[in-house]
Structure formats: structure tokens, C-alpha cells
């Protein structure tokens, strides 16, 4: 049976196993949660004849309540698997006193005036900020909506609002026996004036926050009904692939598309700013046609070094001090007086983000502007890029944020690379049809935007008792801020993201110096999960571990003694050691280690 299904699906253009899962799920399940193009979970129930149409009332920018009693939370952040489409509705459900079964979500439109990340000033997701920056915003929005529901009930029942209770998605007045669901009150509640400072719960009153709850997207991701950009279909849509230069920085000198254009299913071949685009009726047709292209590349400004040469250049830079990122005391003098000095050198390679869903975007140009469907992580940046390339006003650009199959920073691109490509292709074909750009796995790994390569030299001194008495850390890496709107964050040659975790070393060492060399490399790089911490935490913790071992001290106790000024660090380390049974020797053949690092307040 499965072989037959696979064969059938393979022969049908743009039909995939996910579509089969959707059909199967609808036929076999009485109820499910799915995601439409807005990625909002919806109940899959059959329409009832002559039923009242469902209406939705907006109580504020973040809370909508339907006449069907569904509460929809407008999520301003991208859900790339980290779960904000459940976490943020939990905050709303708590303050609203909703029942969890009522909760749904949809992604917000691109509108920084309403949906900006309050830590960034633009609409975007990153730096582990989604919950933190939304915490009070959503609590206030939900508490205001709750107050409006109470006011609507009080006006309808002619009773004091103070006598009305809310629990489990229901508003009630015990003395009169009146009760109403949120859905019954929503339309009237939307006309009420929200309080300026709504009353918020205390943590002791929380019933949902901190409790185990089923994720709102689990069912749809399990049965295949959740829509990602790669699943999206638009009327008349074509599929595009890009031929990128084999060397970073190279450009198209000339190309011959005669063989490609003669292939079945191929619609067009266009040169665009980032390479040559092949447009076809299906992915496979586009892939075969791209393989048939003959392209001559101009390497005059391309990066011609390989990884070995770049690393060799990094090592040479590390022999000098570089820009000063931290200077406490005199590390040089402390190291000179130390009874023992240890030094380690660390090489870190370029690393791809390797998201499960490769880069993809659907772009559709029309007389009304430009619509884009993608897992946008920096909506404001992408919005501006789309408007510039499409040549339309900002108000005529609409970003439909989709669920994303991973990102780890890859979809937060200062120049919106793959989104820019999709819009460029749509423009190159004069908007004749919607274009779905898909990067292959090979494109994804060879296309750049890696975690930067790095080289570190770390030296630490010890006194006779084994205590650290000097610390010097030299970092050589590449800044992905250079050449972007974020370049202004680099001060005195120091990109804070390159030394984060190193410049904030928490251990009690009097003399600490951190230097940074920002290397110029033509390989496109980008923040990669935990950004600079992914380099610096490893270096710092290996060094502390070696100090403890050289001193002959327990690595947990050694760290505890150096963290006296950081009780939160001590608390985490103590709890981890207790849970690991650190005080007892592990069984033979079992080995263990410990490390601790703070990043993004966690």
C-alpha cells in the first residue's frame, strides 16, 4: 500500500506526502488541530447546515475572541520550533482565565508600530527574547480583555462588575445565576473601554503558567496538516531554483540556458543579482534544468582562500593583541608572577545552520503590491527589502509569516538573502505568476551564512594554592555585523557579539584581559544558535576545567569558590551537581564533566 502511495505521489506535480497526511487525517479523525496559511490552529469540524457564521471580535492587537468561543492570540514572533505559538498563548490564557481548550494562535502581520520586539525596536525574533519581551505586554493585553468581558457582562446583567467572576473561559455572577461564555460576550466586550492599568495576577494565582500543557501545534505537526512555506500552493504558482556562484563574492559573467529551456516543464531562466534563476512547473524540473546550465563566473572580487589558509591567517593575527574588549587589572603582570601558567589554543570551523526546512519563500506580485509567504524572523528588515526590490510602497507589502522548520538564526538575515531572491525572480518574470523559491540541501550547505570560523588563544596563571591569578583571552573571528545595518554596534573595533561570554567571564579573577581581532573574510556568516557564546563558553569552561585539574581540586568546588559574587550561578551549579549525584563516584566506565555558562539571562 505504501509503495503504491509513494509512486502515485511521485508522479503528481507538487503533491506531497504531507498532502496525503492531511487528507487521511481529515477522513479518520473526529477532531484535529490544523494550520492554515496564517498558521492558526483551527478545529476540523464539519460545517453545520444553517449555522450562524462565526464572527471574530478584536479586543486588542493581541487577543481575538470568536463567537465560537475560540480565543486567538496574535503571535508577533516566528515559531521555528521553539514553541512560542504555545508559550505566548499560555501567558494570555493565564491572565484571561481562559480554558486551554479554547486557545488558538495566528501569526501577526508585519507591523512594527504594533508588533515590534520591545527589546529590538523592530519586529523580529532572536536572542531568546520572545517570551521575555512579550511577558508584560501580553499579560496586560489579556488582563484588559478579561476586564472588558466582565464589563460587558455587568452591563448586560445590570450587576456590579466587582461581583462577577471569571474562570475556565466562563463569566459568572453567582447571586443572579447568570453565566456566559467568552464567545457570547465577545462582540459587546469589544465595544468596552479597556482599563489603563489592568489588574494582574500574582504568581501564586497562576494555574497554567508552570503547568504541563499540550502544545497547540502538536497535533497538526503530527498528522501533517501544519503548513510550512514548502507546503504552500498559490494559483498558477511556479517553482524556482537559484544557481549560486561556486565562490563567495563571484558574479555572473555570462550564461547559456539553451539546454535548460528545451527541457520539459521549464518556464524561464533569468539572471538576477545573486545568480541565475530557473523557473519550472515543479521542483524536479527546475533542478534538472539548473544542472544543465552553462555559467561563466567572474571571480575578480571573490573570496579565493580555502579554510586552511583562512585559519592560518587567523593564527597569525592571534600573535598580536587586537582591540581591547575587557581590561581588569594587569593580566600581563599577573601572568608573569604566576607560579604556573597554562595555555590552550582553540580552532573552530565554519558551521552551517542545517535547518530541517531549507530556505524557501513564495513571492507574488500584483497590481495591489507584493505578498510574501515565508518563515520571516526579522519581519521589519524583510519588509523593507521586499518593498525596495519590488518597487512598491511599504504599505503595499504583506508578509504572511509561516511556521518554520528550524532557523537557529539562519532566517534572521540582514539582507534577507533568500527572500530577496524570491522577490527578484517574481519581478524578473514581471509578476506573471507566483514564485516559490526552494533552496536544495546542497544549496543550504554551500550557500554561506555560517557560524564564523574562530581561533582562540587563552592563558591563565595560578598561584601556589591553585587559585587563578591572571587571565588573557585572544579571540580571532569574523563579524557578521560588518556591511549590514547593524555595523554601527561595533565600537572601537569590538563587536560585542563576538566576545559575549568572554568579556563577561563571571569567575573571581582580579586581572582579566580580552582582546578581539575582527578578520575580513569573504565567506558570508551569520548568528548561529547562542552566537558568540557558542565559541567563548567552550573556551572559558575548558580553561577553568584545566585550572581545577592542575590544582588537583574538584571542578564543581573550584567553580563554586570562584562564583561567590554570583549566587545565581552558584545555585544553578549546586542544583546540577545534586541532581547528577556529583558527590558519589560514578560506576566504572562512566565518565562525567561539568560546565556552567550564562547567556541571554539564562
Image (cartoon, helix red, strand yellow):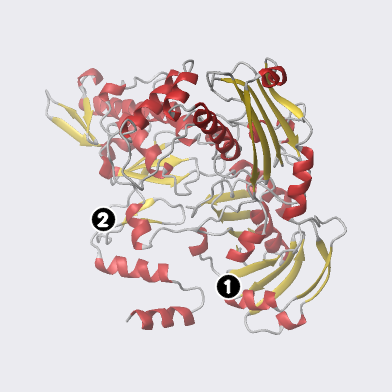
Quick check: can you spot residue 393?
A: no
Work out whether 391 lies above or below 145.
below
Residue 90: x percent and y percent?
A: 34, 37
The answer to which of 138 and 447 lies nearer the viewer is 447
Q: Mark 1 points at which residue?
A: 283
Image position of 3 (left or right of 423): left
Examine the image and state in which quarter residue 577 appears: top left
Residue at 58% in and 58% down: 359
Work out whether 414 lies above or below 364.
above
Element carrying mark 2? loop
Quick check: can you spot residue 72?
A: yes
Residue 521: x percent and y percent?
A: 77, 47
- Rate crowding at label 1 as few (under 14), some (14 to 19) or many (20 or more) other CA atoms within 10 Å: many
Mark 1 → mark 2, Cα distance in angstroms: 42 Å
Image position of 375 (left or right of 18): right
Element carrying mark 1? helix
The answer to which of 312 and 267 lies nearer the viewer is 312
The answer to which of 516 and 70 lies nearer the viewer is 516
| The disc label shown at residue 256, or none | none
The answer to which of 333 and 381 lies nearer the viewer is 333
Residue at 59% in and 25% down: 504
Is the residue under label 2 in contact with that under label 1 (CB below 8 Å)? no
Residue at 56% in and 29% down: 119
Tell which circle, 1 or 2, labels the residue nearer the N-terminal end.
2
Residue 422: x percent and y percent?
A: 65, 60
Q: Name the residue under label 2.
A: 51
Work out whether 164 lies above or below 485.
above
Counting the numbered discs, the total is 2
Amino acid at each position: 500500500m505504501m509503495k503504491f502511495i509513494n509512486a502515485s505521489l511521485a508522479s503528481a506535480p507538487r503533491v506531497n506526502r504531507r498532502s496525503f497526511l492531511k487528507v487521511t487525517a481529515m477522513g479518520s479523525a473526529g477532531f484535529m488541530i490544523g494550520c492554515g496559511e496564517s498558521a492558526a490552529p483551527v478545529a476540523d469540524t464539519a460545517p453545520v447546515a444553517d449555522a450562524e457564521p462565526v464572527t471574530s471580535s478584536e479586543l486588542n492587537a493581541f487577543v481575538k475572541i470568536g463567537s465560537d468561543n475560540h480565543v486567538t492570540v496574535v503571535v508577533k514572533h516566528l515559531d521555528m520550533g521553539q514553541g512560542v505559538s504555545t508559550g505566548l498563548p499560555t501567558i494570555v490564557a493565564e491572565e484571561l482565565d481562559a480554558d486551554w481548550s479554547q486557545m488558538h494562535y495566528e501569526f501577526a502581520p508585519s507591523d512594527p508600530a504594533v508588533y515590534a520586539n520591545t527589546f529590538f525596536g523592530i519586529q523580529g525574533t532572536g536572542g531568546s527574547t520572545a517570551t521575555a519581551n512579550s511577558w508584560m505586554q501580553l499579560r496586560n493585553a489579556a488582563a484588559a480583555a478579561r476586564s472588558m468581558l466582565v464589563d460587558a457582562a455587568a452591563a448586560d446583567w445590570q450587576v456590579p462588575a466587582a461581583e462577577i467572576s471569571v474562570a475556565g473561559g466562563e463569566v459568572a455572577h453567582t447571586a443572579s445565576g447568570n453565566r456566559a461564555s467568552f464567545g457570547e460576550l465577545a462582540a459587546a466586550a469589544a465595544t468596552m473601554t479597556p482599563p489603563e492599568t489592568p489588574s494582574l495576577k500574582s504568581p501564586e494565582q497562576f494555574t497554567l503558567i508552570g503547568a504541563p500543557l499540550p502544545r497547540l501545534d502538536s497535533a497538526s505537526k503530527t498528522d501533517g496538516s501544519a503548513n510550512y512555506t514548502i507546503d504552500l500552493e498559490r494559483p498558477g504558482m511556479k517553482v524556482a531554483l537559484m544557481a549560486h556562484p561556486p565562490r563567495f563574492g563571484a558574479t555572473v559573467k555570462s550564461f547559456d540556458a539553451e539546454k535548460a529551456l528545451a527541457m520539459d516543464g521549464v518556464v524561464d531562466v533569468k539572471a538576477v543579482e545573486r545568480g541565475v534563476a530557473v523557473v519550472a512547473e515543479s521542483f524536479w524540473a527546475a533542478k534538472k534544468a539548473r544542472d544543465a546550465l552553462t555559467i561563466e563566473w567572474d571571480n575578480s572580487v571573490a573570496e579565493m582562500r580555502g579554510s586552511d589558509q583562512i585559519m592560518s591567517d587567523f593564527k597569525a593575527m592571534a600573535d598580536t593583541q587586537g582591540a581591547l574588549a575587557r581590561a581588569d587589572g594587569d593580566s600581563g603582570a599577573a601572568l608573569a608572577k604566576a607560579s604556573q601558567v597554562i595555555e590552550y589554543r582553540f580552532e573552530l570551523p565554519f558551521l552551517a545552520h542545517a535547518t530541517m526546512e531549507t530556505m524557501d519563500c513564495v513571492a507574488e506580485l500584483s497590481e495591489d503590491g507584493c505578498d510574501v509567504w515565508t518563515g520571516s524572523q526579522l519581519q521589519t528588515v524583510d519588509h523593507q527589502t521586499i518593498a525596495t526590490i519590488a518597487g512598491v510602497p511599504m504599505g503595499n507589502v504583506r508578509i504572511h509569516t509561516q511556521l518554520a522548520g528550524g532557523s537557529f538564526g539562519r532566517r534572521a538575515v540582514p539582507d534577507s538573502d533568500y527572500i530577496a531572491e524570491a522577490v527578484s525572480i517574481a519581478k524578473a518574470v514581471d509578476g506573471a505568476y507566483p514564485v516559490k523559491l526552494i533552496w536544495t540541501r546542497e544549496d543550504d550547505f554551500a550557500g554561506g551564512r555560517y557560524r564564523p570560523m574562530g581561533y582562540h588563544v587563552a592563558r591563565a596563571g595560578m598561584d601556589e594554592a591553585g587559585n587563578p591569578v591572571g587571565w588573557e583571552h585572544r579571540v580571532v573571528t569574523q563579524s557578521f555585523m560588518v556591511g549590514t545595518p547593524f555595523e554601527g554596534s561595533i565600537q572601537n573595533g569590538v563587536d560585542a557579539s563576538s566576545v559575549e561570554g568572554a568579556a563577561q567571564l563571571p569567575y573571581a579573577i582580579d586581572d582579566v584581559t580580552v582582546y578581539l581581532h575582527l578578520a575580513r573574510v569573504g565567506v558570508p556568516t551569520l548568528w548561529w544558535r547562542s552566537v558568540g557564546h557558542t565559541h567563548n563558553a567552550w573556551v572559558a569552561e575548558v580553561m577553568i576545567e584545566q585550572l581545577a585539574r592542575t590544582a588537583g581540586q574538584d571542578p564543581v568546588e573550584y567553580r563554586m569558590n570562584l562564583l561567590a559574587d554570583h549566587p545565581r550561578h552558584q545555585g544553578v551549579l549546586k542544583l546540577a551537581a545534586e541532581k547528577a549525584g556529583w558527590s558519589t563516584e560514578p560506576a566504572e566506565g562512566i565518565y562525567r564533566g561539568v560546565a556552567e555558562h550564562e547567556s541571554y539571562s539564562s
